[in-house]
Image (cartoon, rainbow, N blue to C red):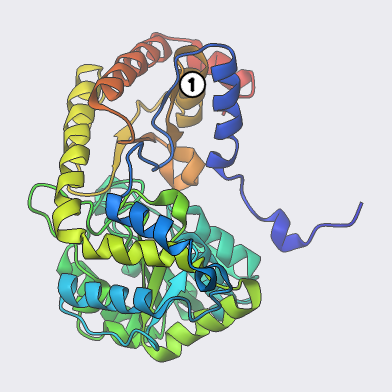
Amino acid sequence: MPRLAKRFETLPEYVLARIPQQKHELLKRGVDVIDLGAGDADLMPPEAAVRRLTEAVQIPAMNRYGFGLGLVKYREAASAWMKKRFGLTFDPLKEIVPLIGSKEGLSHLALAYMEPGRVAVIPEPGYNSYIGGTLLSGGEAYKYALRPRTNFLVELDEIPADVLKRTSVLYLNYPNNPTGAVAPLDYLQRVVKKCRELDILLVYDNPYCDMTFDGYVAPSIFQVDGARDVAIEFFSMSKTFNMTGWRCAWAVAKPEIASSLAKVKSFVDTGQFQVVQAAAVAAFENFDEWVPRNLEVFKARRDAAVSSFRKAGFACEPPKATMYLWIPLPENVPSAVFAERLMQDEGVIVLPGSGFGAGGEGFFRISFITSPERIAEAAVRAGRVLKALTAGGETKRREKAGVA
């Protein structure tokens, strides 16, 4: 058996990797499964995008390699959206990088900036591509625990000075997955200032910028003075347009940073399917009409989730953004124990906080990916499990059995 690389062996388990198989087994047993796990809503993309897809796939040239350039109209549409949404101007050919989903771009970027001895500051809990890209590129991960005491913000002043001196990359994600936290503008200004002082690349992951509620408007990092010197921002069609499976996204940065990601990608892929990019252009064109209606659906689901889980005995507040609730558990209930019991006994899939890293322990995440009625039913089932686990003894028995 060939020996695995040490960097591969450092990769943690990805919590979502095993859930599809577990869900399949539950369904085979006839269990009524309510899946609140992945951020993958049961909603259709814009009709205009679907129509454009079916039209574009009939064009022979659209089925050929897109290469790094991709469909120029897609680059132009992303650039125009940045102007319309944030008032920011970016060159579509030099400062926009089409991606096969933001996950691959976030991971591949590390190959341009990380190496042994260099540090990436990674929020924990956080998206798995941050840690994956860092470790696979030979870098060192410094995990910063996102906790309520800092409003789930990464406070750079709390990181040891010797770590910051070796830090090449800082990953930030606001509105935040999984906590739902948002970042005030003055906080972002402090972060940009620190990154400029220390010459740290600020990787700002912003796929939930348009999944916001109650009047909150999420900013671009580039609305902060000086951010263009040190930042790259990632956007996705996945959440805003219900296009998760289409794997279509883009990154934006000044040419020197954008070109580093583009160069890495030139060695690992041959570009996004141009037909999908054409469909994404249609989605952009329907942004004003389609997105507000879609957000109404998510707001109804959010409100149902908050109300239902509160009634079931959980403490939670309505998030200003994202498609998630980050729900605290009692101290004596490990998140993995709770999630496993909830899935096996009640058929409800949620993600344990520990699955996002040790910093996420004490919480679990639900996604607004099904109807308010099904979310309410899931909350009732979760309440039964919570009551059973806090009744005494059950948690210790499960821990001894190896569920942790």
Would residue 26 be found to the left or right of residue 230 on screen? right
Q: Position of residue 107 (x, y in %)?
A: 54, 65
Q: What secondary structure is found at the residue carrying circle 1?
A: helix
Q: Where does the image place residue 132, in percent across and percent down from the top left?
A: 57, 59
Identify which residue, 101 or 393, lies in the foreground.
101
Vertical placement of residue 133 versus 95, above or below: above
Above or below, 376 against 258 in this view is: above
Where residue 4 sits, quadrant-wise, is bottom right
Horizontally, residue 63 falls left or right of residue 189, namely: right
Question: Of 2 and 275, which appears nearest the observer?
Answer: 275
Residue at the far right in the pictured view? 1
- Circle 1 Cα neighbour tier, 10 Å, few/some/many (<14 / 14–19 / ≥20): many
| Figure label count | 1
| Residue 148, above or below 159 | above
Q: Quadrant of residue 63?
A: bottom right
**The C terminus: image quadrant:** top right
Label 1 belongs to which residue? 343
Residue at the far left in the pictured view: 215
Asked whether residue 11 is in view, the answer is yes
Q: Is residue 158 visible?
A: no
Rendered residue at 23%/29% (across/down): 305
Q: Nearer the viewer, residue 339 or 45?
A: 45
Residue 342's x, y, as percent? 45, 19
Name the spot of residue 88 as percent of width and height, x first: 20, 81
Callout 1, which amino acid? Met
